[in-house]
Amino acid sequence: MFTFSESPAPVRSDIPESFRRLWDTVAEPGPALTALQRHVVLDLARTGTPEPSDAGGLPRALLELAQVLYTTPASFDYTLVARASRDAGYPATVEVIALVAILAAVDGFHRALGVRLEELPEPGTGDPTGRIAKGLAPRRTHVPMPRGAIPVALDLLPDVGATYRSLFGPLYMTPAEMGSSTFSRTPGLDRAQMEVISSRTSLLNECFY
Amino acid sequence: MLRESAIAFDYEFDPATIADPVAPMHIPGGEMLRRFVDALFNHPGISLQTVRDEILDSLGPEALIDSCSVFGNFEMMNRVAEGTGIPLSPREIERQTDLIETLGLASP
């Protein structure tokens, strides 16, 4: 799993290690969704196939959110979140946003490198964990979250937020590295070169944040 | 971030070149990295394989991996931002006003 044997360049070991940990986590039940429901969301986002007859009991609005956010984030709007939250609740909606975003990171890396996408992990069994932060509300945001910047945006679901943040170091920079404008991977890209990639990607996704 | 890091590295970078697909960026390999992202967004006339090979040859294998990983990271971050609707702080908007206007990102 995540061997990158077809890669045109050696892949830093921290990347496949983080992806393997991620796949293990994704295969388990989440805070609001079963492992099977998580698998349905990821599969639908990636394949774009019509809603399966057995969609794991997930509301159509939640599946539509997953599909649009994965395939065309530039056309994403608040009404998708509002409908999903109304039909499935905030925790399930945040979990789907997180799953799709994390899948976009893994698949984006593979597409950029020109290697085949990794198969989704087989879903495990068990009930959702129910680990959901208490006392949060939307704060001029689509979903409840604590005060802070984008690293805490998914912290309605603390475990999910931690999983999301675990990708920052391998894929971009650790929080300590982000504090340095002159950070450079040696050998590799310096921070300005990295920000060319991040800025152009955000511009084409029509995301200013 | 880009503006601050370009200044830190003494690159004569103009933020408007992020929105311009052909303008010189005055960052080593900048045009190539910008073209790499454009290829990933299927812009016509740009071969992803060709740009990937260019990065490999010009900047090295580690730089190619960094380019792919940063792209993946921002595919994720952009979706988290869009999905959760997290806003820029008023302070950040004020700090970035000129960039917002340069890139034509102000809301109508």
Image: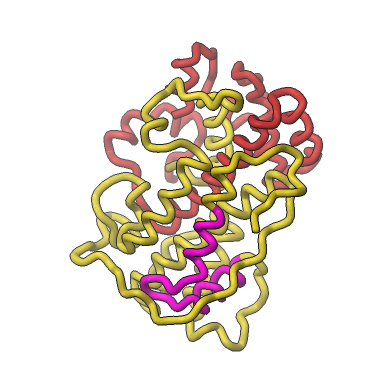
Chain colours: A yellow, B red
Task: Tell me the chief SS of the magenta region.
Answer: helix
How far across and how far down the image is residue B54, in percent?
77, 29
Residue B16 visible in the snapshot: no
Residue A164 position (above or below residue A186):
below
What residue lies at 81% left-to-right and 35% top-to-bottom?
Answer: B50
Q: Where is residue A32 in the image (x, y as percent from the top left)?
A: 38, 74
Residue A45 found in image quarter: bottom right
Look at the image and tell me whether residue A22 can be seen: yes
Residue at left offset 41%, top offset 31%: A177
Q: Is residue B89 left or right of residue A114?
A: left
- Residue found at the very far bottom of the displayed protein: A53
Instruction: Look at the image and give the residue range highlighted in magenta.
Output: A19-45
Q: Which residue is drawn at 42% across and 23% down?
A: A181
Q: Residue at x 70, y 44 (%)?
A: A113
Q: Quadrant of residue A68?
A: bottom right
Relative to B4, is A63 on the left or the right? right
- Quadrant in which the N terminus of chain A is drawn: bottom right
Q: Position of residue A90 (x, y in %)?
A: 34, 70
Foreground residue, A41 or B91?
A41
Tell me where residue A71 appears, x and y as whole percent.
61, 60
Relative height, residue A179 to residue A7 (above, below): above
Quadrant where the image shows the C terminus of chain A:
top left
